[in-house]
Each structure stands twice: as C-alpha cells, then as structure tokens.
Amino acid sequence: MKKSKLESLPDKQLIQYLKYLLKILSNDYTLTTLNSFYILFNDHELYGKAKAPIGGSLSRLDIEYIYWILNHNDIDETNELTRPNIVMKEVTYIEEYNVVHTTQRSTSLPTYVNKDMTPQYLNNLVFNDDIDVYQWDHITDNVSDNFDIIQNYFIV
C-alpha cells in the first residue's frame, strides 16, 4: 500500500518542514476543511515552494498527512508529533446518464388502406389497443453513443 513519504521523516525534521510550510502559507492558510487545504496546493508557486525542501513532488497522501498532523498537533509547542495511521476508505462514485435507446419493431399489418396509412393513424390504433406493437418482431436495439451525464457524485 502506498504511503506518504513524510512518514519516514523523524519528528524533528518533519516539525522543521511544517514550520517552513506554515510560514509560506501565511495568510492563505486555514484548516477549515481538507478540500480547502488541498486547493491551496494546486497553486503552482506555493506547490513549488512546498515541495522544494523534501526534494520531490507532494502526493495526495502527503497533503493529507500534513493536514492531519497540523490538525492534531501544536507545531510550535511540541517536539513529538502525534501521527496518523493510513487506512482504506470505501468510496463510491455514481454517474447517472440520459441515454437514447431505440428499439425498432416491425410486422406485416393487414390493411385495406395501404396508401392512406399515416403515423398519426397508427398512433391512434395503438392508443385504442387496436394494434399491439409489443407483439411485433423485435428487429434491432440501438443504444446511442451520444449521452449526457445528468448527475455525478460520490458516496463516502
């Protein structure tokens, strides 16, 4: 299982890094939510400064690790950190689609009015139960590749 590279840092080095990080975050820094904290790291200038001391990029798990430690420790008052344990969290992503599904049915319909038969007339026959299109031969099903996502969301 992948973990944060910050787990391997001793407390003294990690505290030093976190103090540096708090200094560059300055006024932008709030611990209101994990999402707002994560968004701060999408700023390219801030991200560049934040990753420089650790010699590489910061992963999502690194950012979560930093967020947890800052939420559960007073960095200015401690020499020993309380650290999080990594766990597996089940999440579900749901997408709802509007899909165009076309079914074609055909039959040979006995009639005396071949040239006068119209779609409107046939619709009236269906409405009045004079014909049952679901009894006809099923020829093709077609699901269109053109669809719209009408809603997408996560369940946590």
Image: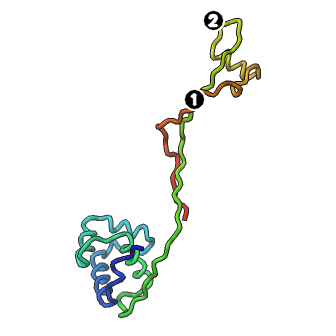
Residue 95 placement, left or right of 24: right
Kind of residue sitting beneath label 2: Lys
Which x, y percent locates residue 2? Answer: 39, 73
Secondary structure at badge 2 equals helix
Query: Label 2 belongs to which residue?
Result: 115
Taking the image as shown, residue 147 lies to the left or right of residue 58, namely: right
Q: Label 2: few (<14), some or many (≥20) within 10 Å?
A: few
Instruction: Decide if residue 74 is on the left or right side of residue 22.
Output: right
In the image, what residue type sits under mark 1? Answer: Thr
- Sort mark 1 into few (<14), some (14-19) or many (20+) by Cα contacts within 10 Å: few
Q: Which corner quadrant of the image does residue 54 belong to? A: bottom left
Looking at the picture, tell me which residue is in the foreground, 60 or 19: 60
Does the CB distance between marks 2 and 1 fall below 8 Å? no
Residue drawn 43% across and 71% down?
34
Q: Measuring 25% from the left and 73% from the top, which residue is drawn there?
A: 56
> In the rendered image, which residue does mark 1 sit on?
140
Measured from the top left, where is residue 47 in percent x and y?
A: 28, 69
**In what element is the residue under mark 1?**
strand
Q: Quadrant of the C terminus?
A: bottom right
The spot of residue 55 in percent (x, y) is 23, 76
Quarter of the image with the N terminus in it: bottom left
x and y percentages locating residue 86 in the rendered image? 45, 78
